[in-house]
Image (tube, helix red, strand yellow):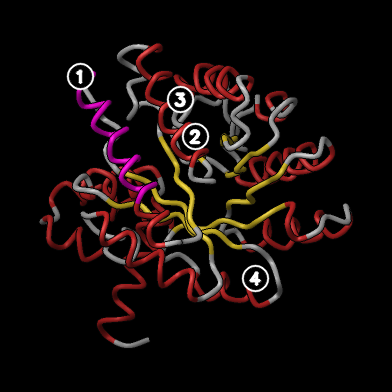
């Protein structure tokens, strides 16, 4: 099956855009903010929380970075107007991290300040390892200024992750999807799982709020065991999933009384996002192709 997944990924550049759009339509809200709002409204009606992400982190000028920040201000305003239960997730490269550190910090502070004024929250996404130090540095700097409505992401496949835990009070913990060298990242499936659980235990032990971001059933079960044994109330953690992935399992978690947040990406850069995510995670390509085949031909 892994060989088939990788074969599907290698074929992606030759696949017409309408076909990629069909493959990814369940996993991306659409090209516009209205699309994202519509999806979040439906999720909220089912008892699920949301995180809205604006696609388009590949900026090349300061004006483009400021434009991405401006879109986040629009998102926050719409969430406020619609009274939705959703926060936002930002990629620092989209706010100008690769152009100028101070520009990125300026954009981040403006978005976080806007969110705070509206009683909302901002999650800083984690990208590839070339940005990890700067991402954590920016998070700590802005958080230290009193921005209690700011969180960050840790990726369990990085060997450094447990060492990065101290001092982080609100963390989304995920496996991680970027291709990294074995010197800095675990390659073995079970090693990544083990580091995920070690990191979760370390975060809970220091009193952090944790977003447990996984679709891995083993990690879901083990995380439930860990939070139960720690005696965590349901408002001190949440599970997080991607839009369109394992929605039935998400429904079960909600029915059992757990907080469940769904990652809702939208934007005109849907094609680049779709191809990149499928290339970085061949298993998702196989899952999506299988799902599409089942819907077209009957399960």
Residue 72 is covered by the magenta coloring: yes
Residue at position x 27%, y 85% in the image? 297
Task: Give how far apart the Cα atoms at labels 2 and 4 are.
Answer: 25 Å
- Prevalent SS, magenta region: helix
Q: Quadrant of the N terminus?
A: bottom left
Disc nearest the viewer among 4 and 3: 3
Q: Which residues are magenta?
A: 61-77
- Tell me: residue 290, above or below residue 191: below
Task: Give how far apart the Cα atoms at labels 3 and 1 are.
Answer: 19 Å
Residue 124's label in the rendered image is 2
Q: What is the x, y in percent for residue 129?
A: 48, 24
Q: Quadrant of the C terminus?
A: bottom left
Dot placed on the residue nearer the N-terminal end, 3 or 1: 1
Q: What is the x, y in percent for residue 49?
A: 53, 61
Q: Nearer the viewer, residue 47 or 160?
A: 47
Dot placed on the residue nearer the N-terminal end, 2 or 1: 1
Q: Nearer the viewer, residue 112 or 162?
A: 112
Disc nearest the viewer among 4 and 1: 1
Task: Give how far apart the Cα atoms at labels 2 and 3 are.
Answer: 12 Å
Task: Give how far apart the Cα atoms at labels 4 and 3 are.
Answer: 34 Å
Contact, mark 3 vs mark 1 (Cβ under 8 Å): no
The residue where tag 4 is placed is 253
Dot placed on the residue nearer the N-terminal end, 2 or 4: 2
């Amino acid at each position: 099956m892994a060989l088939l997944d990788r074969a599907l990924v290698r074929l992606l550049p030759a696949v017409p855009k309408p076909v990629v759009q069909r493959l990814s339509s369940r996993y991306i809200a659409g090209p516009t903010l209205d699309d994202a709002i519509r999806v979040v409204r439906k999720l909220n009606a089912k008892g699920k929380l949301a995180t809205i992400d604006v696609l388009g982190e590949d900026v090349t000028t300061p004006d483009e970075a400021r434009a991405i920040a401006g879109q986040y201000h629009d998102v926050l305003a719409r969430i406020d107007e619609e009274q939705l239960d959703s926060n936002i997730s930002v990629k620092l490269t989209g706010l100008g991290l690769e152009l100028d550190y101070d520009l990125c910090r300026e954009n981040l502070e403006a978005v976080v300040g806007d969110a705070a004024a509206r009683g909302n929250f901002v999650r800083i996404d984690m990208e590839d390892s070339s940005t990890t130090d700067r991402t954590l540095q920016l998070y700590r700097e802005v958080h230290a200024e009193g921005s209690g409505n700011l969180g960050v992401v840790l990726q369990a496949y990085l060997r450094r992750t447990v060492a990065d835990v101290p001092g982080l009070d609100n963390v989304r913990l995920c496996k991680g999807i970027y291709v990294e060298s074995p010197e800095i990242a675990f390659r073995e499936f079970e090693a990544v799982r083990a580091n995920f659980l070690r990191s979760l235990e370390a975060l809970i032990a220091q009193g952090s709020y944790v977003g447990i971001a996984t679709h891995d059933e083993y990690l879901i079960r083990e995380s439930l065991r860990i939070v139960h044994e720690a005696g965590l109330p349901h408002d001190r953690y949440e599970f997080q999933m991607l839009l369109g992935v394992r929605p039935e399992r998400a429904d079960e978690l909600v029915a059992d009384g757990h907080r469940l947040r769904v990652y809702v990406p939208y934007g005109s850069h849907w094609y680049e996002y779709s191809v990149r995510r499928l290339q970085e995670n061949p298993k998702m390509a196989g899952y999506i192709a299988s799902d599409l085949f089942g819907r077209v031909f009957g399960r």
